[in-house]
Image: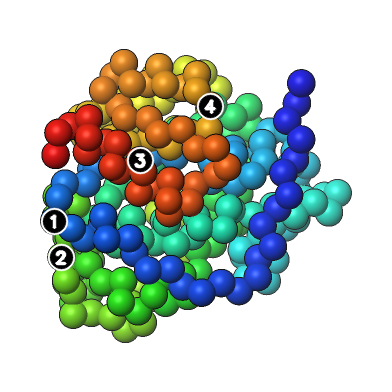
Amino acid sequence: MPRKLSKQPTLTETTPAALPPILSDGRPLPRAIVFDLDYTLWPFWVDTHVSPPLRPNATHNACTDKIGERFAFYDDVPSVLRGLALAGVKLGVASRTLAPDLGREMLKLLHVPPMSSVLAEESNVDGGADGAVAPSSGVGSNSNSISSSKKDKARKAIDFFDAGLEIYPGDKIRHFKALGKRTGIPHAEMLFFDDEPRNRDTESLGVTMWLVRDGVTWNEVVNGIEEWRRRRGV
């Protein structure tokens, strides 16, 4: 039975989030964090609930389809993408949607707001003068403020996924083999967020999967990183 379309985020202005301490405690982080799309980054099935063509709103934080339904990320997702990228973690997507082109289009049309809009001023990690971040093996302090970063501007969500986009029907083991081949990152160094228990089969490759119940939030991210560390004994 098809899943009903969830209530979409309200898109009200929110207080910028502080990066959780786990991103700057000096302990190892996953080298790559991979996300499912449907009911993980956004509260809908892109191949079931969305009727193209899509039209973004003025700020590109939501899209409307041809019947007037509005679609957006879960509330924490923009700050999560900003924060993990700032911490030097590579980001990827593994989705088995039947509408891969529409999924990619949604990621292009939905923008992540400027860093200063989604992360608190004290959310600093180790980086250079150009705002680049240090490797994720250990993040520390940074004298550059969020607001002064040269990269403090809205960006297409799709641009954050530097580990790659594997968006097509099929077994997610195939998705992760492709991600591993592209990045050269061992699967044991990857953390995967997904809403479907059946995708735990990816753990046969060495991936750590964290099951999300109601979309990605900072709490889910922290819990997932803690589980990844526990399994690796770090």
Q: Which residue is mark 1?
A: 26
- 137 relative position to 169: left or right: left
Residue at x-position 35% and y-position 40%: 224
Q: Earlier in the sequence, mark 3 or mark 4?
A: 4
Give yes or no for contact between labels 2 and 1 (Cβ–Cβ under 8 Å). yes
Give yes or no for contact between labels 3 and 1 (Cβ–Cβ under 8 Å). no
Cα–Cα gap, marks 2 and 3: 21 Å
Q: In which image quadrant can residue 24 be found? A: bottom left
Kind of residue indicated by mark 4: Glu
Q: Which residue is mark 4?
A: 196
Residue at x-position 22% and y-position 46%: 29
Residue 70 in sight: yes
Q: Earlier in the sequence, mark 2 or mark 1?
A: 1
Cα–Cα gap, marks 2 and 1: 7 Å
> What percent of the width, then of the height, locates residue 183?
25, 37
Give yes or no for contact between labels 2 and 3 (Cβ–Cβ under 8 Å). no
Q: In which image quadrant can residue 122 be found? A: bottom left
Q: Which residue is mark 3?
A: 224
Residue at x-position 26% and y-position 71%: 124
